Image: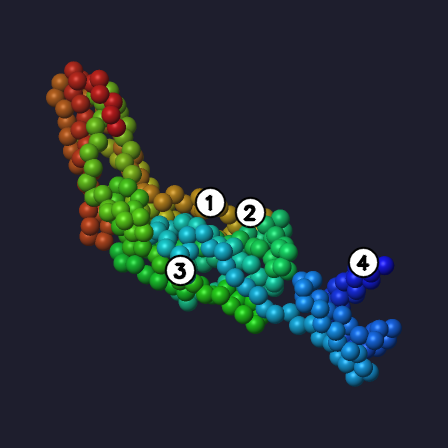
Amino acid sequence: MKHNHIFDTAKRIVLLAVTAVLTTTTLQAQEALHLFYRNKVHKIIELTPDTEIKFVKKPCISVVGYDINEGVLTISASAGRTFGYGEVLANDDYTISFDVPWLRARNNKLPEWRNPNRDGTVSNPFLIFAEGNKTGANRRGTVTISIPGNQYQFVVEQMGGGLSFTPVGERYGLEPTLSTNKQIAASDTTFYVYVYPNVGVTLKSYPEWMTLVVMGSDGDKFSLDMLDQISDDVVITQEYLCANISSAYFKFAANDSPEERTGEIVFELNGETAVCHVVQKGVEDSSSTDK
């Protein structure tokens, strides 16, 4: 019987929490309200005709941010990409705002991505997107995630151009690679070369024996308005809009000479150059296919 009494009391407390505001007119059959805090602290409130009970929801918000370290999310210079995403834990619908125009957030709005938690909060993931940083210098913006009565803030730092043949991040302690060597077999007639990032990079020069087919820099085609054109039923991933590298695709005739031929492919960003030294083997030394 004692167990049933506790169970019935718990049911009444749940009912009270749902109705939010109650007066003794709904509790005429009770002389006292028994409150339990996680089944440990038991408090009895004596009821009188003037008793008014209010259950107030305390605003609760926090962010689980992958790659957010001490409140700072570091992202690359590339357009349309992030190095991670965040997950908002809130007991109310949240909004995201920025103090800079080059940042935008996109919520995954599908219902199955809104996961209710035992503590009454709801998990809803979001992605941070950025316009490409062509300035060559780091820049910072503040993200504010808000619900009525509470908010959470963190900083997004976007790296500068960092021209390189290897995608480079300051947080990994890597230095840009501004020169590289590539060997081409005598029989090869096509060649790709990739450079980082995917915004602002231009092709300055290339060997006369090569013909440029296309110089691709997807980041130059990206704008934050593209996010508004994507349907709400699409779950956006980090790879959804752009790769993070620029690429140049060349064609040329096979080398039928015994002499090797050489040249330089030069890329430029903010006055900085990256040089790819290419060597195509002669026809008598075509066994090497190292690329």
Contact between marks 1 and 3 (CB within 8 A): the answer is: no
Residue 129 percent coordinates (x, y): 43, 54
Q: Looking at this view, is 160 or 15 the one in front? A: 15
Residue drawn at x 60%, y 53% as measured from the top left = 114
Say few, some or many: other residues with alpha carbon within 10 Å of mark 1 (under 14 / 14 to 19 / 20 or more). Answer: few
Earlier sequence position, callout 4 versus callout 1: 4
Residue 88 percent coordinates (x, y): 53, 58
Q: Looking at this view, is 23 or 161 the one in front? A: 23
As measured in the structure, the alpha-carbon distance from the residue carrying label 3 to the one carrying label 2 is 31 Å
| Mark toward the viewer: 4 or 2 | 4
Earlier sequence position, callout 3 versus callout 2: 3
Q: Is residue 202 visible?
A: no
Earlier sequence position, callout 1 versus callout 3: 3
* Image: 151 above or below 280: below
Residue drawn at x 50%, y 59% as measured from the top left = 63
Residue drawn at x 52%, y 61% as measured from the top left = 62
| Quarter of the figure with the N terminus | bottom right
Q: Which residue is most to the left?
A: 259
Residue 38 percent coordinates (x, y): 67, 62
Q: Quadrant of residue 24?
A: bottom right
Contact between marks 2 and 1 (CB within 8 A): the answer is: yes
Mark 1 highlights which residue? 240
As measured in the structure, the alpha-carbon distance from the residue carrying label 4 to the one carrying label 2 is 49 Å
Q: Label 2's element?
A: loop
Earlier sequence position, callout 2 versus callout 1: 2
Residue drawn at x 34%, y 56% as measured from the top left = 158
Mark 2 highlights which residue? 234
Contact between marks 4 and 1 (CB within 8 A): the answer is: no
Q: Amino acid at mark 4?
A: His
